[in-house]
Image (cartoon, helix red, strand yellow):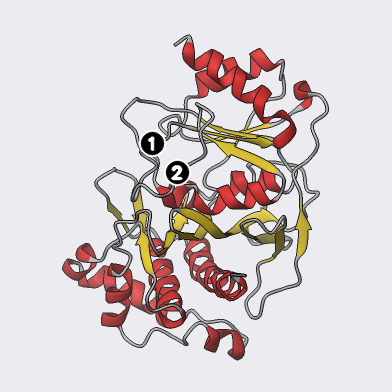
């Protein structure tokens, strides 16, 4: 199966959802709720999830969806629900053919709530399951930093399609890696990363407001000398151990300061060679990564020439439900040096 239609719809759906998130980002809307895991939820999260699930259900009605959000809090908070509906009903692509391919607009506020709640799949090893993070890096989104709209198709436990919309990353694949976004109203930002598993190709293209823009192939950068490599890591110390990261860098002889940014923008950045290595190191033994936080980035890095494993060298297992419960941590690097990086990770974590 080629998955070309899935890739096309996923890219259009993510692009449309980013238009909504950018509107919220620039207006600095701060409608938030707290989730059980204490990370903030913005109105952009709910709106983006509704738009993407509507597009998936319009094109692939039998597929399941694992979404991060659910609408019970909105049914209790009519004012917030109304705010989100105002965003959703006004979010559309300028190209009518593309908009029609996504199933057209969401028809009502109730349909919006039903779409949000349709992301309730338990995940698993069988069938076609979409993993969606409507705004990955919510804290970065709220502070005005990097965030991503993330969508992946998992079939029988393996990621087949991955798309990342990163509105605040530079369009240029040769731009230096930086957590700064510069002038958020300036031009030259907004990139859409995508890949189909086992195709041997990953792409980037500018995020637009209508039909998909032309794409170009991306590749991980060759790292002949590991001491020259650049690390990407999470901003939040609660997401990844900064101390272990520093110890691993020292063991590898890497002296460059790590670039800290939120979201799967890190996967996209290393996939196009702006950075080299991405580590997400366990902060506690019982923590389980969510599949929507890694599925799209995993396949994009792999198809760009990288290897992605956990801290023990095992491939990320997306067949176990809504979490990566069989994995601890993430190590992503160019194939040629992944083993060297993994050896340093094992050495540091094993001595803890």
Residue 241 at x, y = what percent? Answer: 47, 25
Residue 317: which numbered mark, if any? 2
Residue 46 at x, y = what percent? Answer: 36, 65
| Res. 181 in view | no
| Res. 225 in view | yes
Q: Which residue is drawn at 73% across and 58% down?
A: 171
Q: Is residue 273 left or right of residue 332?
A: right
Q: Residue at x 66, y 60 (%)?
A: 191
- Give neighbour class at mark 1: few <14, some 14-19, many 20+ (Cα, 10 Å): some
Position of the N terminus by quadrant: bottom right
Q: Which residue is drawn at 19% across and 70% down?
A: 75
The foreground one among 85 and 58 is: 58
Position of the C terminus by quadrant: top left
Residue 202 at x, y = what percent? Answer: 70, 57
Which one is earlier in the sequence, the residue at label 1 or at label 2? 2
* C-beta proximity under 8 Å, tags 1 and 2: yes
Q: In this view, does 126 lie to the left or right of 218?
A: left
Residue 100 at x, y = what percent? Answer: 53, 89
Q: Is mark 1 on a helix, strand or loop?
A: loop
Q: What residue is pinned by disc 1?
A: 326
Number of numbered labels in the structure image: 2
Q: Residue at x 38, y 72 (%)?
A: 50
Residue 29: which numbered mark, if any? none
- Give neighbour class at mark 2: few <14, some 14-19, many 20+ (Cα, 10 Å): many
> In terms of image quadrants, where is residue 109?
bottom left
The foreground one among 136 and 22 is: 136
């Amino acid at each position: 199966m080629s998955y070309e239609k899935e890739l096309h719809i996923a890219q259009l759906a993510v692009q449309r959802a980013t238009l909504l998130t950018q509107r919220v980002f620039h207006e600095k809307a701060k409608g938030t709720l707290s989730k059980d895991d204490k990370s903030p939820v913005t109105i952009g999260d709910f709106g983006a999830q509704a738009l993407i699930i509507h597009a998936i259900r319009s094109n692939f009605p039998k597929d399941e969806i694992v979404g991060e959000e659910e609408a019970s809090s909105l049914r209790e908070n009519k004012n917030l629900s109304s705010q989100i509906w105002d965003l959703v009903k006004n979010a559309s692509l300028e190209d009518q053919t593309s908009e029609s391919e996504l199933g057209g607009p969401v028809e009502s506020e109730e349909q919006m709530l039903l779409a949000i709640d349709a992301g309730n799949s338990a995940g698993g090893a069988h069938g076609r399951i979409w993993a969606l993070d409507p705004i990955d890096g919510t804290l970065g989104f709220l502070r005005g930093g990097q965030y991503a709209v993330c969508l992946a198709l998992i079939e029988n436990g393996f990621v087949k399609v991955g798309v990342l919309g990163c509105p605040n990353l530079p369009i240029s694949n040769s731009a230096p890696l930086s957590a700064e976004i510069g002038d958020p109203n300036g031009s030259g930002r907004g990139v859409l990363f995508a890949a189909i598993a086992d195709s041997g190709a990953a792409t980037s293209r500018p995020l637009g407001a209508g039909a998909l823009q032309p794409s170009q192939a991306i590749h991980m950068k060759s790292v002949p000398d590991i001491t020259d490599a650049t690390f990407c890591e999470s901003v939040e110390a609660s997401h990844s151990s900064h101390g272990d990261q520093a110890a691993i860098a020292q063991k590898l002889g890497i002296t460059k300061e790590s670039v800290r940014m939120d979201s799967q923008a890190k996967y996209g950045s290393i996939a196009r060679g702006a950075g080299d290595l991405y580590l997400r190191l366990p902060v506690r033994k019982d923590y389980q990564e969510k599949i929507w936080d890694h599925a799209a980035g995993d396949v994009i890095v792999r198809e760009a020439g990288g290897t992605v494993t956990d801290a023990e060298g095992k491939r990320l297992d997306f067949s176990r439900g809504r979490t990566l419960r069989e994995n601890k941590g993430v190590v992503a690097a160019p194939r040629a040096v992944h083993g060297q990086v993994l050896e340093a990770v094992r050495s540091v974590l094993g001595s803890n």
